[in-house]
Image (cartoon, helix red, strand yellow):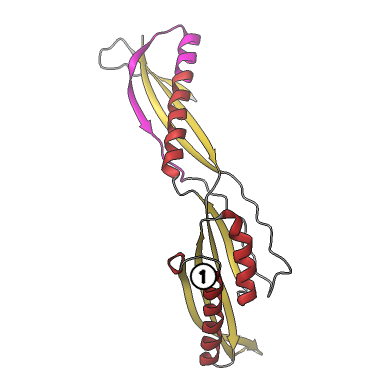
Amino acid sequence: MYYRQPIRSSDGNRFRLTVIGEGEVAATPDIVQVTLGVRTEREHPNEAIQENARIANNIIQNLENLGIPRERIETRTYNVRPIYDFIEGKSILRGYEVEHLFDITITDINQVGEVLSTSAEAGANVIQGLQFKLSNPQEYYLQALSIAVQSSTKKANHIAEQMGVTLLQPPITITEISDEPVSVFQPEGMVLAATYPATPPITTQDVVIRAKVSVVYSYS
């Protein structure tokens, strides 16, 4: 996309040409974040809390047995709430629900399926989704930014050639456009079964890093 501004630059003899350059780089994720945990429901709050704590501790122990350190197992939410049934227009207290969810950071992509099955065996019954990430996104962003600048140069040169004008160097301005974050593939959430018959296969998708620049040239 480009346009010619009808306003002349300060010397009165040059027009301006603005081009948008875009670049993207695909990279294989090397970090996976899994949000999972346990939701328990009992008639009395203490019973729900105790049962939830027992299962949560089992989940943590199983994950540590897989080699995932405690610092990569972080509590995301912990909630205790009453549960009501609505019968004939009245709210009847049925019991209490306790939910404890963890953010698990996995640095071995091949271990994701094992983490899910092991957690389910320990009693985990909720998973909200997987996030595939990069440990060094800035490195790939800089590559995408270089491609974006090269793209803008090619566009400007092509437009100038078609118009029969001469671009003046260097450009007047080069502006980085950061209107979108690093793209991350995130599958939809799901509910874990009580147990897995086998380790679930987890496939990954490349993370796409995008960059964009706006470059203003003067020409005569």
* Residue 206 on image: x %, y %: 58, 44
Seen in the image, is 181 located left or right of residue 41? left
What residue is shown at x 57% (from left), y 85% (from top)? 83
Reply yes or no: does residue 156 show up in magenta. yes
Identify the magenta region: 155-181
Q: In this view, does 80 lie above or below 206?
A: below
* Residue 50 on image: x %, y %: 52, 88
Seen in the image, is 193 located left or right of residue 83? right
Which of the 4 image quarters holds residue 218? top left
* In the image, farthest residue toward the right: 197
Task: For label 1, count other residues whose C-alpha is less than 10 Å away and answer few (under 14), some (14-19) or many (20+).
Answer: some
What residue is shown at x 53% (from left), y 75% (from top)? 61
What residue is shown at x 43% (from left), y 26% (from top)? 149
The local secondary structure at tag 1 comes to helix
* In the image, farthest residue toward the left: 11
How many marks on residues?
1
The C terminus lies in quadrant: top left
Of residue 137 and residue 44, the one placed in the foreground of this image is: 137
What residue is shown at x 46% (from left), y 36% (from top)? 211
Of residue 100 and residue 113, the one placed in the foreground of this image is: 113
* Residue 135 on image: x %, y %: 45, 49
Seen in the image, is 60 located left or right of residue 119? left
Q: What residue type is labelled 1?
A: Glu
Reply yes or no: does residue 66 show up in magenta. no
Which of the 4 image quarters holds residue 122? bottom right
Q: In this view, does 199 lie above or below 215?
A: below
The residue where tag 1 is placed is: 64
Of residue 51 and residue 58, the one placed in the foreground of this image is: 58
